[in-house]
Amino acid sequence: MKPVVLRTYQDNPPKKKAVTQTLLMSMYRALFEWFGPRHWWPANSPFEVCVGAILTQNTSWKNVAKAIDNLKAADRLDPIKIYRTHHEELAQLIKPAGYFNVKAIRLRNFVNQLAEKHDGDLESLFSAPLAELREELLCVKGIGKETADSIILYAANKPIFVVDAYTKRVLYRHGLVTENADYDNMQSMLEANLPLDVDLFNDFHAQFDAAGHFYCKRIPLCEKCPLHPFL
């Protein structure tokens, strides 16, 4: 089989807006038809989404799920209960997620903000307009853009596109962003060319991740990928 030659942003100059809109939605439909709905984020409550978003940094979801199960078994999956839990106990409960001492601090920073400013009420936190909510989350030490946006999209159900390494890889290889595009560049491009729709943003991000995980690897499997027709 002959090697696949990837076209890049340099080979594919930026598309005009109408073309970009059509291309993105065509890519989404192809991924949806291939993978089906991704049902992401897996959680039973908005607070569980928040905890998962913080714990999933630099680890697999399988390990995060184990840590969340530990919190449930210990009856600690609640903002006020975590707020009242000693650091050592919290760190041990989330140990499967890795970097448990650091993540225990980050999780505590989040619940401290939630408990002390919002009386532990997520609805109070989420009642702010999207931009204000994002600013407040980013002010919590240990919460970066991807984590904040995951909380906003998947827990608060507000329309913001979450970007990660898989998203960038797929976009770059299809000529939609430059190699040095940063988080804000990619997010702005996606939000400018897609309907501001929570369900679409939710599933499209998950579809990008599925494409990246199974096909758009560091050494890509382009000829098997549902996005191959768009190269």
Image (spheres, rainbow, N blue to C red):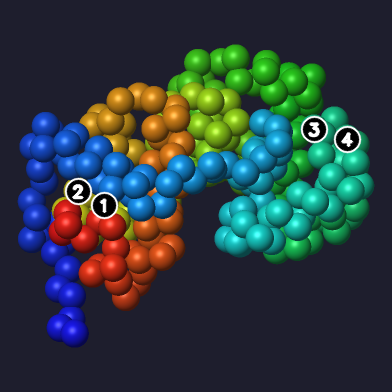
Question: Marks 4/1: CA distance?
Answer: 41 Å
Compare marks 4 and 1 and give the one earlier in the sequence.
4
Q: Residue at x 78, y 61 (%)?
A: 95
Q: Determine whether, in the image, residue 66 is placed left or right of residue 191.
A: right
Is label 3 in a helix, a strand or a loop? helix
Which residue is at the front of the view, 61 or 207? Answer: 207
Q: Residue at x 43, y 56 (%)?
A: 210
| Residue at the outermost bottom position | 1
Mark 4 or 1: the one toward you: 1
Q: Mark 1 near mark 2, Cβ–Cβ under 8 Å?
A: yes
The mark found on residue 79 in the picture is: 3
**Badge 3: residue crowd in 10 Å (few <14, some 14–19, many ≥20):** many
Residue 192 visible (yes or no): yes
- Kind of residue at badge 1: Leu
Q: Mark 4 near mark 3, Cβ–Cβ under 8 Å?
A: yes
Could you say which quadrant of the image residue 122 lies in? top right
- Kind of residue at badge 2: Leu
Q: Which residue is mark 1?
A: 171
Question: Where's residue 38, x and y in %?
Answer: 49, 45
The mark found on residue 176 in the picture is: 2
Question: Marks 2/3: CA distance?
Answer: 40 Å
Q: Which residue is mark 4?
A: 81
Mark 1 or 3: the one toward you: 1
Task: Classify 168 as above or below 16.
Answer: below
Q: Determine whether, in the image, residue 164 is placed left or right of residue 105.
A: left
**Badge 4: residue crowd in 10 Å (few <14, some 14–19, many ≥20):** few
Q: Determine whether, in the image, residue 180 is placed left or right of residue 117.
A: left
Compare marks 4 and 2 and give the one earlier in the sequence.
4
Question: Marks 1/3: CA distance?
Answer: 37 Å
